[in-house]
Image: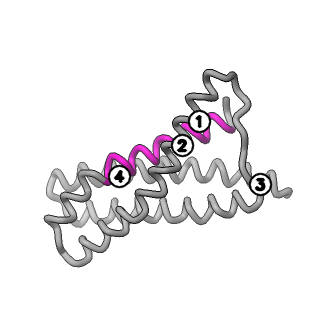
Amino acid sequence: MTAEAVGEVLAGVNALLNLTCALFLLAGVRQIRQRRVRRHQRCMIGATAASALFLVLYVTRFSLTGTHTYEGPEPVRRVYLAVLFSHMVLAAGVVPLVLRLLYLARRRRFKGHRRLARWTLPIWLYVSFTGLFVYYMLYHS
């Protein structure tokens, strides 16, 4: 199997991991709103694990195939680049936020955890869903 073929497979796996993360996040929000703390914890661990595995596989794919260029029409390309830029910036920014949330939860500092989670959740969801958008634009449009 060539590096390009492995990269194609990893890109699809990464899209699936983005979707998995988003679903875990949404389920986790539902669980905490229903005061099911243990289920919430499991969902958030699942979201974190999906994101961590995504990062490992993304770096692997990048090392094998490098960057990809969107070759679509110019107006669509501009939208793609705007979404890609915001995705990349927020993806880098969400990592320390998630690590802080995990730290606060582990230390049972739930008031601070809750305050930070209100900012982190929409960012993390945006990163997950725009990751799917970027994948679709690069590999299926």
Rendering colour mode: one colour
What crowding class fits label 2: few (fewer than 14 Cα within 10 Å), some (14-19), or many (20 or more)? few
SS of the residue under disc 2: helix
> Mark 4 or mark 3: which is in front?
3
Residue at the (23%, 66%) spot, across then down: 38
Q: Is residue 130 shown above or below 53?
A: above
Disc 3 to disc 1, C-alpha distance: 19 Å
Query: Neighbour class for label 4 at 10 Å: few (<14), some, many (≥20)?
Result: many
Residue farthest to the bottom, as pictured: 107
Residue at x 73%, y 62% (from the top left corner): 63
Mark 2 → mark 3, Cα distance in angstroms: 20 Å
Picture residue at 85% right of the left edge, 56% below the top: 2
- Residues under labels 4 and 1: Cα distance? 26 Å
Image coordinates of residue 109 in percent, x first then y, are 17, 72
- Regarding mark 3 in the picture, which secondary structure is present there? helix
Q: Earlier in the sequence, mark 3 or mark 1?
A: 3
Please indicate whether residue 117 sits to the left or right of residue 12 in the image: left
Q: Which numbered marker is on residue 65? A: 3
**What type is the residue that disc 3 sits on?**
Thr
Image vertical order of residue 96 relative to residue 94, above or below: below
Sequence-wise, the earlier of marks 4 and 2 is 4
What kind of secondary structure does the magenta stretch mostly adopt? helix
Name the residue that disc number 2 marks: 85
SS of the residue under disc 1: helix
Say the numbered circle drawn on residue 81: 1
Q: Which residue is mark 4?
A: 25
Amino acid type, mark 2: Phe
Observer-nearest residue: 94 or 28? Answer: 94
Label 1 is placed on what type of residue?
Leu
